[in-house]
Amino acid sequence: MKKFDKERVLLAVAGPVIALLLAIALTSVVLIASGKNPFEPYGLMLEQATFSDVQVLIVNQASLYYIAALAVALGFRMNLFNIGVDGQYRLAAVITAVVGAHVALPAPLQIPLLLLVAMLTGAFWAGIAGVLKVTRGVSEVVATIMLNAIATSIIGYVTLADVWGVQVGNNMTTGIMKESGWVPGLDLGPDVGEIYGLVFLAVVLGVLYWLVLNRTRFGFDLRASGASETAAAASGVDSRRMVLTAMLISGAVAGLAGLPLLLGDSHTYSLSFPAGLGFTAIGIALLGRNHPGGIALAALLWAFLDKASPALDYATPVAYEKEIATIMQGLIVFAVVISYEAVRQWGLRRQQKRVGAELAARNNSQTKEAAAR
């Protein structure tokens, strides 16, 4: 049985906790500088989290964040910076919406078809950056940024009225999808709301992520390639193949990020479909340290800040700007970089001291044995 390593757990938890506390402290400084109470906004937002309808909104939003952050984390574990998750998930959502609006199959076939379309679209779009990297050495950061812009243009074209666009009021949509492709959720009542059915898909993806990375040869090869391509090559791992595979899987997961909302609520892609999800996912993956459990907590925190902050606009007798939550989210990302590096340096020093103490103890033991002889 593997021995429980308290120091390793401490190092894993210290980074996120320090980042969160530092972000709260810096946000409080901003509030004080603007002449506002530095503590009341946190109490107001925490109060919102006690309401059932807000809890449903948080869980639903967190499911989108979680899937997108898993896609980012897959790249990180391979030492790849897939900044194109935003384009991959939006393009996958619009193509899935078009297919869902024009193909009518029984639900047992329609829903798997839509999931497959989303995964293939995301994988294809991420795969372009993967191919460019392994064949031409193009940085995945540059490639995915450009692909994000191209994806936006493609989405604009797809939603044109003379292509697949359907105008609803002042909004362009892809038309309502066939009902056989709708995924029913968990209805908690008229005053509470409905939890998206694909929230459970996010849970399954998290479990698969952990199992594949930690309990399979493929996961070991992926992590080894991310840690050291040279060492991985020496053990027979084709690092170029792993780069392409990681990008394809990351894109496939990213393609699923918008489906809880698309199949569970909106049932169409429109110009109001949320953008920027992929960039938010980068901060969530960093805060969660690429661990499925940590990412889940980070996604819930981000969703909580999103859904609880509107109440600040209506606070009495003094209203607070809801942008406080946005400031806090930005400061968390900033603090993550600082805290993780500080914790890493502290961990290295602790390790060096422990190794030094063990070597000193061994030398003393050998000296005493020599003297006894």
Image (cartoon, rainbow, N blue to C red):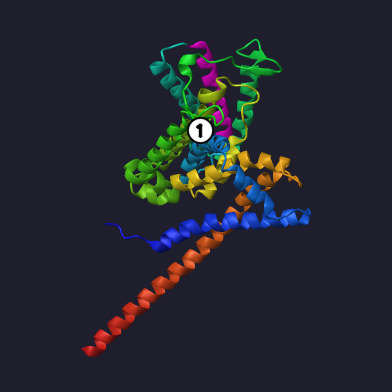
Say if 120 sits above or below 294 in the image.
above
The residue at which mark 1 appears reads as 254
Left or right? Give the position of 348 relative to 213: right
Left or right? Give the position of 70 relative to 2: right
Label the magenta part by its dominant secondary structure. Answer: helix
Kindly identify the amino acid type of the residue bearing the numbered disc 1.
Answer: Ala
Image: magenta residue range: 85-103
Task: Tell me if residue 322 can be seen.
Answer: no
Say if 366 sits above or below 93 in the image.
below
Left or right? Give the position of 84 relative to 368: right
52 or 348, which lies in front?
52
Q: Residue at x 63, y 54 (%)?
A: 23
89 or 300, which lies in front?
300
Task: Tell me if residue 339 can be seen.
Answer: yes
Dot 1: few (<14), some (14–19), or many (≥20) neighbours within 10 Å?
A: many
Q: Is residue 310 magenta?
A: no
Q: Residue at x 27, y 86 (%)?
A: 368
